[in-house]
Image (tube, rainbow, N blue to C red):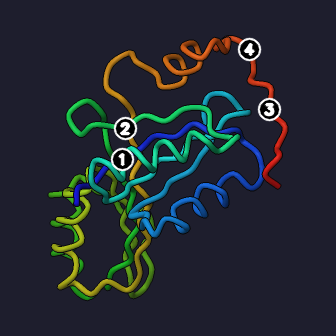
Amino acid sequence: MSQHTLAVLVENSSGVLARVASLFSRRAYNIDSLAVGPTEDPNISRMTIVINVEGHALEQVMSQLYKLINVIAISEMQTNSAVHRELLLVKVSQDHREKVMEIVERYAAKIVDEAESSITIEASGESAHIAGLLEALTPMGIKELVQSGLIALERGDAALSDRTLSAQGISTTHSLIPQADYQN
């Protein structure tokens, strides 16, 4: 199986995330990572979905996603033509403070909170960078961690919304008028 990152533009309305997740669940595909957030247009949200599937299954997933009424556009974010990042917050023990500070500096992370017995570190970067930081911090005593899902943007001037909305004949200078939600 190979990992694929999909950028999905959807209408910003209730129930869309549940329908997308349900689509994957019904077909027994596991979502490795899911990040959802607003875009430059308040009527549109962007989902970044990471899945492990083979070629034909990827085509099926994309085809089924397009059938959902609230899905506007889908694009696969290729590793070499997109910027991929994750965010990590991790709380470690103060017992090895000097070593933790050295690791923080080496991974270009930053300390966002210090308490009597713990240090909270923030880091962002590619998945391998975040994994390396976690591996280095594990011997220091990780008390708690939270990691975001992967997010990605195409490199260069290209914008998914400009490319897909104008290709569909939807003006990118006016707000999108939400479609009737027949799936609720």
Asked if marks 1 and 4 touch (Cβ < 8 Å), the reply is no
Residue 99, horizontal then vertical, whole percent: 15, 75
Residue 155, horizontal then vertical, whole percent: 31, 25
Q: Which is more toward the observer, 59 or 14?
A: 59
Label located before the other in sequence (1 or 2): 1
In the rendered image of this protein, does residue 70 appear above or below residue 92?
A: above
For disc 2, the marked residue is: 76
Q: Is the C terminus in the top left, top right, bottom left or bottom right quadrant?
A: bottom right
- Answer few, some or many: residues within 10 Å of disc 3's Cα (few below 14, many 20 plus, some between 14 and 19): few
Q: Say whether residue 166 is left or right of residue 110.
A: right
For disc 3, the marked residue is: 178
- Answer few, some or many: residues within 10 Å of disc 2's Cα (few below 14, many 20 plus, some between 14 and 19): some
Q: Amino acid at mark 1?
A: Thr
Of circles 2 and 4, the one toward us is 2
Q: Say whether residue 80 is left or right of residue 25.
A: left
Residue 81 lies in what quarter of the image? top left
Residue plotted at (67% across, 15% down): 170
Label located before the other in sequence (1 or 4): 1
Q: Disc 4 and disc 3: Cα gap in Å?
A: 12 Å
Residue 117 lies in what quarter of the image? bottom left
Label 1 residue SS: strand
For disc 4, the marked residue is: 174
Label located before the other in sequence (2 or 3): 2
Label 2 residue SS: strand
Of circles 4 and 3, the one toward us is 3
Residue 5, horizontal then vertical, whole percent: 36, 47
Q: Amino acid at mark 4?
A: His
